[in-house]
């Protein structure tokens, strides 16, 4: 298949491009390199030394003989270029990772909110409009987030995208299937809720074939392909904006810093290993919807953990301590999260668990690149509202810990 | 109150600005005049001779002594200007009409789809981000559409925004209130579905006070204020993109042309008179939500009619014939639409009905300005898909009728 990997220079996109290229597909990476610009804006860098996309693609060719083409296109700002590329190249499948993906970054200031909405909504809509316009019949696989669901408020497991409900009507109760009601918790998550409605419309009006993967937090660094050469290594974000909670714990452990838990740590999150991410995408590609089908939605996660349990797991592996800080996010202190992921299991996914995989991360990533850690970048300071931002900034314990670094 | 009327140069915005100014409010119109540029793009103009906003505001001052200020700001493209204006002027209420509002225009081509999404989503999100950032406590009243609902599929009346459902949980059925599941039928309607999610988020995260008015098709031209001077007259769109079905019937009747019904005419639509629109906005302003409340949603319509019944009503008043053409929209041939509008009735709205008000439109608007009608502009040719567009273009009956004109 000819496959376009949009956002193929990013954390999930790069190993996906390698995995699919390795399987013999003709892979094209499209990326505007905005994530590298954001690194520059924030003054942060990947823990792992990451080469340019052009260099990485060159190494891949050297190691495997396979070609991955790179095209610099901005999905949000270069509609005409995107449309031209699609109509000339006519890919069989398009995997869409190309969005601003950090919740804290999306809440940093009004201009970050505006950027995130503009970039993500325009990018996704431009893609859909161009697919409809060119009439290509590619299968679109999009990376969504578990965050569109909010949390399972009524105690039932979160189903895969659609929910069966009963409605009172004049002629008695009637059953109906609806998109799971969305309750996004940040501007970033909100853009994924908007994406869902875009997909629903274009699937219905234009018969586009779309799969939306509601993904949990991705952890892990290496996949079978990224391990093949040092210069193929994946990025590892640990800063307060892009570093996920687990990555920040790993880094704190590596430098002998207490693991900073926000709030009570009672927030439950869903996780998946990067190796399973690339495998899920392969599985989703092999199970494409037909023209006219509704959007296919999968929950792409393999386990859920409370943040404090995760901290304990890392503490046990590394000997680190745990420190509790105020939460800059507007969210419930404690929440449950029960998630259905039957579809991927049925297709043959065999999950890597945190219990199995974490030690490798501690040793082969965090410890190995310890000398590249900039301690000042670890704390999360983006507040969800001005009050919460001020509190995170002023908090004495936060300062104490920051001053340790 | 100091009230900002965003989109105050438009069909609903202008009479609203006059109505509120007449009641003694300090009214500021914000508009980028894009609707006038679209007139130029399409080569169409209002049936009624409409002066510039600057001139209309001057006449209003002359007639009433009241000042309406006009500010040319693009909500979607001038975030910083918008934010500055809000932080300096600190309005008590903001009424948001400033969106591209024609479904056929939104479906004309890929670039019209892209424009509609960019303009509407960015505009609304910029406004919300600026309100949160400046910390002003204005009540935001937004004009949504009945079209976010799709149609009442299970035969229950469409409630005002929220729906009570029952969900199966491990501990039995549980009731929950959700946003009515959205099923927009065009890119334009889709942007209003996206707006809803933006509102939900900013009400929840930032405590913004928001009312969303899901409006039916607005008909009628005059309000008490627009009648006071010839140069205060409201716009009247009759072209295939911006002219609503009723306006096109009126124009066809005025020139002795058959009333063109798309499909069987079994589609049911909701309607409201422009005088009731301005009154509803006054009522919604008087009934503002508190900080922390969920978004308040009203159905702003007063009656529903099947398109063919509407055609018959106009035919009876004018002696016109009816012609049936293929439908360029992707929609069910026949549908019911039962809508709840208890909230506005409870607040004291006394609707103007089509049966009462239509004759005035036939005589005082359509007949009076008959000499300004450009017959070539009446047919609706935007197709919802390429196939439907080709059919509308080629259809022999459509051509016969177009060639009559
Ligand atoms: N990493 C996670 O834990 C996680 C979890 C759930 C969902 N996701 C989703 O998976 C996708 C990929 O995430 P990631 O972690 O790889 O993010 P990332 O930031 O590392 O990669 C995103 C890539 O997209 C590119 N991009 C962004 N906007 C673009 C535009 N307008 N045009 C072209 N390219 C653009 C960036 O330059 C970057 O290379 C995102 O959509 C994200 O929301 C990620
Ligand atoms: N007319 C109807 O039948 C109807 C029915 C339901 C809902 N509505 C909604 O009511 C609102 C007003 O409708 P209308 O019929 O008056 O439309 P209109 O096109 O006559 O007026 C909209 C006004 O907003 C302005 N505008 C558009 N984008 C802007 C931007 N980015 N920045 C600043 N100004 C901008 C335009 O120049 C125009 O003057 C719309 O949101 C529409 O969706 C209208």
Image (cartoon, coloured by chain):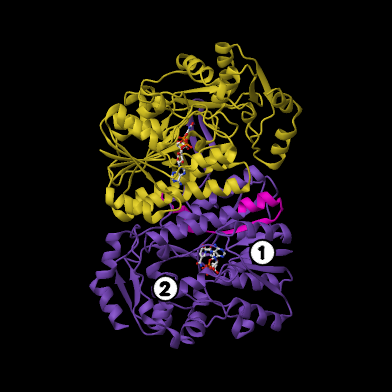
Chain colours: A purple, B yellow
The answer to whether residue A203 of the structure is visible from this angle is yes
Q: How many marks?
A: 2
B375 or A180, nearer to the observer: B375
Within-10-Å neighbours for mark 1: few <14, some 14–19, many 20+ = many
Instruction: Determine which quarter of the picture holds residue A108.
Output: bottom left
Position above or below: A395 against B211: below
Q: Quadrant of the C terminus of chain A?
A: bottom left
Q: Tag on residue A206?
A: none
Q: With A71 as the anchor, is B143 left or right in this view?
A: left
Q: Quadrant of the N terminus of chain A?
A: bottom right
Q: With B157 as the anchor, is A141 left or right in this view?
A: right
Q: With B300 as the anchor, is B260 left or right in this view?
A: right
Magenta highlight range: A128-154
- Residue that mark 2 sits on: A42
- Residue drawn 58% across the image and 31% down it: B239
Q: Position of residue A293 (x, y in %)?
A: 66, 46
Position above or below: B287 against A82: above
B355 or B52, nearer to the observer: B52
Q: Nearer the viewer, mark 1 or mark 2?
A: 2
The answer to whether residue A349 of the structure is visible from this angle is no
Specify the subunit that label 2 lies on. A
Report the Cα–Cα distance between label 1 and label 2.
29 Å
A110 or A172, nearer to the observer: A110
Within-10-Å neighbours for mark 2: few <14, some 14–19, many 20+ = few
Q: Position of residue B133 (x, y in %)?
A: 32, 56
Q: Secondary structure at mark 2?
A: helix
- Residue drawn 31% across the image and 29% down it: B62
The answer to whether the residue bearing label 2 lies less than 8 angstroms from the nearest atom of ligand 1 is no
Tell whether position A141 is magenta. Answer: yes
Q: Are marks 1 and 2 in contact (CB under 8 Å)?
A: no
- Residue that mark 1 sits on: A4
Specify the subunit that label 1 lies on. A
């Amino acid at each position: 298949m000819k496959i376009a990997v949009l956002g193929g220079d990013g954390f999930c996109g790069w190993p996906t491009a390698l995995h699919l290229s390795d399987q013999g597909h003709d892979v094209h990476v499209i990326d505007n390199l905005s994530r590298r610009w954001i690194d520059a804006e924030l003054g942060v860098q990947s823990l792992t030394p990451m080469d340019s996309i052009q260099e990485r693609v060159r190494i891949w060719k050297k190691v495997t003989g396979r070609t991955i083409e790179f095209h610099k296109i901005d999905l949000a700002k270069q509609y005409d270029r995107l449309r031209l590329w699609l109509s000339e190249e006519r890919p069989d499948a398009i995997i869409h990772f190309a969005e601003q993906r950090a919740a804290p970054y999306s809440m940093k200031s009004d201009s970050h909110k505006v950027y995130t909405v503009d970039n993500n909504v325009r990018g996704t809509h431009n893609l859909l409009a161009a697919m409809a316009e060119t009439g290509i019949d590619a299968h679109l696989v999009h990376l969504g987030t578990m965050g569109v669901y909010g949390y399972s408020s009524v105690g039932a497991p979160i189903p895969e995208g659609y929910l069966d409900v009963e409605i009172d009507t004049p002629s008695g109760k009637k059953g109906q299937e609806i998109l799971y009601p969305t309750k996004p918790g940040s501007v970033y998550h909100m853009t994924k809720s908007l994406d869902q409605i875009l997909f629903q419309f274009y699937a219905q009006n234009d018969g586009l074939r779309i799969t939306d993967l509601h993904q949990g937090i991705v952890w892990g660094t290496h996949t079978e392909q990224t391990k093949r050469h040092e210069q193929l290594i994946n990025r590892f974000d640990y800063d307060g904006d892009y570093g996920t909670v687990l990555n920040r714990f790993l880094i704190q452990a590596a430098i002998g810093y207490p693991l900073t838990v926000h709030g009570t740590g009672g927030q439950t999150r869903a996780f998946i290993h990067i190796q399973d991410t690339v495998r899920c995408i392969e599985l989703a590609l092999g199970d494409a919807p037909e023209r006219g089908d509704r959007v296919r939605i999968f929950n792409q996660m393999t386990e859920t953990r409370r943040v404090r349990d995760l901290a304990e797991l890392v503490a046990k592996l590394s000997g680190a301590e745990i420190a509790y800080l105020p939460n800059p996010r507007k969210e419930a202190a404690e929440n449950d999260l029960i998630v259905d992921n039957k579809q991927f299991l049925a297709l043959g996914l065999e999950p890597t668990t945190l219990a199995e995989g974490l030690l490798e991360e501690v040793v082969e990533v965090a410890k190995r690149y310890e000398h590249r850690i900039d301690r000042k970048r670890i704390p999360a300071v983006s507040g969800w509202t001005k009050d919460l931002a001020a509190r995170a900034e002023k908090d004495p314990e936060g300062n104490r810990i920051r001053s340790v670094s």
